[in-house]
Amino acid sequence: MEIETEFGVNVFLESQKVLMNDDLQKMLSTMQDLWERRCKLLMCCHRLWKQLTDVLMDFFETPGTETFRMDMFRFFVESFSQNINKLKLVMLGLSVSGQCENNSEALGFLSSLLEKVNTPTTKDAYVYALIETARVKMLCGDLDSSFELLNKSSEILDELDSVDSIIYALFYRVNADYYKSKADYGLFYRNSLLYLACNDLFSLSIHEQQQRAYDLSIAALLSDTIYNFGELLHHPILDTLLGTEHEWLCKLLSAFNSGNILKFESLMGYFLKQPLLQSSIPFLRQKICLMALIEAVFKRSPHDRIFKFSTIADETHLPEHEIEHLVMKALSLGLIRGSIDQVDEVVRITWVHPRVLDIKQIDIMKKRIEDWHKSTYQLETFITNVGSDIIENEVLSLRKVFQKCFVCHDVLKRSLLCLQCSYIGCWRRRHSETHAKAQNHIFAIDMFSGYLYCFSCHDFIYDPIFEKIYTLVKRKLNIKSSNIKNSICLSNKGLELPIDNYDYLIDDDSQVICCGDGLRGIQNMGATCFMNVVIQCLVHNPIFRNYFLSDGHAVKNCLQDNCSCCAMDTLIAEFFSKKDFSIPFGPSSFLEIMWKLSKELKGYVEQDAHEFFVCLMSQIHNHSGSKIDTKCDCIAHKTFSGILQSDVTCSSCGNVTSTMDPIMDVSLELKIKSVVGVESSSREHLVKSLQECLQRFTSPENLSNNEYKCSKCLSVSEKAMKQLKFKRIPLVICFQLKRFEHSSTPTKIDTHVNFSSQLDMFPYISQNNYMDCYKDDCIYDLLSVICHQGQINTGHYTSFARLNDNWFQFDDTAIFITNEKTVLSSNAYLLFYIRQNLSYQL
């Protein structure tokens, strides 16, 4: 039966009236009146369609209309479905689908509804119907299809600018139901809270509220990713359990939130009756101990977070021999950050995971802030008093420090400034010496160290008066101890110089060069720690730093849009120009440009630091104007480019075929296959050191059968030998330790790989290159390290970098001074080594 005329619609509505009560008849009469008024108009009236839709929505939501909804939709609503809001049409349709006799019939109805709203301008309506389809498929037991539809819905929602909250409410509700069926407690918990955030709690029945509160409580307890209970404890849905048989769950959650082990033990009688909790008692005990550890850390000041094993044992009620394992578990979960000293049985904690605080914890934080305010008052007064002496615009001064050689214009060379004219020449190519001989200018200043050089003596001159002044100034400014503070330069006031003639030192002391050290935190813009660690490593790479600080890339003359070199120049300038280094840098412009240049980086999702490094170097190369990688003189290739030589030896004739491949980094396997023939469980082992990785990387290996055809004897060698060696080693070597395995089951290798502060690359260069390479040129010093904590899909990046003789750890906005021992004990992911014998010092 189809209604094609206005008369037919009226007949249908009249036939339905006689079956309804008085209230429903009035609603139907209103619909009939609006329908007839619409028919009398010569053209469609949007206001009438909206009024009619609103009455229909009220009708479908009224209890007692369930038996009428299907016919009303088929014989009335569908007759003008093209004229009403498509999202409202889907809402009406979803009310109808719930009245279908079975799920198969509901899927058929939803399929026809999807066809009606599948247009480019009605994506919100389409995705709403799609999510409901996923829900019904889940009821049918087809979880795989349901998951695919939910993923498709998520992609559509990401594209929409504005989405009605009812769509998100359904989306998170269905997602929560899916993860509940898969026993994924963490994702169920998060999606359930998001569902409640999009929905009016009082629109749910009291039974549904209590069931949702119970499920959320169980999920929070059993999830291995949830260690922050404050959000649930403060949610009003938990109040629905008060006065019920499950009220004990509220007390148990409170015990976990505060790490109260005694309270946990007292409540065990309740949850022993719950099968899910009873089967997870060992896990729950470990979790409450972790929460007790977090609470103990939180109560202490950030400057007083050194714990003995015995102290942690008292807090967690665990024996001391289990404390190291507990702390390692907390570190691996990202709940805390720090280090363990197994010898002294001490744990140093530098960071604790943020969480929602209860009233008691807020009081602790309030007292801590008050104490901090008192302790910083004197520092505030000091900064205010000396503020007038702080030199601003350090970048201008740095341009003077890292100047180019007047002849070769290369900033990567150690340069000398002539004291008898303004000439600047490099050391290695002897342009400064050539100038000295030609002009008879024998004195020059090393522009990095500040030492005086005499070309007649061919040696540095150490004048006792000059050295005394230098020592006094250095001591006054406390350079060594202020590396983690703002780099400031005070005037000559208060310096007791041992001479009266200032001309002996300088002619004009009105402008004192003041170089910032680049120690500055970086704000996390939303899962951008992968970018922050790479930036820190590049900022503290002297070759990269000097290039951009000395106008290696002419920003003012660059006409390229979204230029990565301009972005890097601006970024590095920020690290050396701000007068207040305590304010973290927010690299929003840099991030935006990288998004535009590399779409795979776009979005606030966790990325791989190595992939970002490779992408950034590629973009810098592209925007430097050079196209040939092997002979490129861009800063990326000058710094990181090397050549890898691959030699294949034919087993038949002994012919060696060599190929040369340019490299920007070296990826090293951590899982090595052993000799074939041993048991499968023992065929693979993990390397223990960087040297072992390099030895494996450059060791000869047999090619598989029929894999190599000799170009000389044309035979297909069954036992050809292949060996990799370094033909040319870059100035800075980037090693990637391949910790992430993206197989059918993605895993992360968390084993520690030993590496040293100094690396000899001579054993790994090709034999043909021995004569061309000085052994001293193969000695490398550790420059920076990037680490990854957490699992393969979720985690956090931190980094270490060396500045002069000091090591610093960078964790987004936080900077910590550390030592070489801590660096070498870290689980490195990326290692940067710099050639020791450069033509300038670090």
Image (cartoon, rainbow, N blue to C red):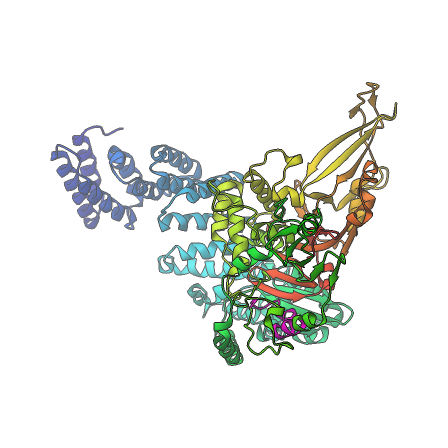
Quadrant containing the C terminus is bottom right
**Which of the 4 image quadrants contains residue 74?**
top left
With 673 as the anchor, is 8 left or right in this view?
A: left
- Which span is picked out in magenta? 471-488
Question: What x and y, as percent, mark residue 193?
Answer: 46, 57
Q: Which residue is drawn at 71% across and 48% down?
A: 430
- Residue 686 in view in this figure: no
Q: Give the answer, above or below, for where 525 lies relative to 154.
A: below
69 or 381, which is in the foreground?
381
**Which of the 4 image quadrants contains residue 719?**
top right
With 604 as the anchor, is 460 left or right in this view?
A: right
Q: Give the answer, above or below, for where 30 lies relative to 787.
A: above
Question: What x and y, as percent, mark residue 218?
Answer: 54, 60
Quadrant containing the N terminus is top left
431 or 362, which is in the foreground?
431
With 648 as the anchor, is 107 left or right in this view?
A: left
695 or 355, which is in the foreground?
695
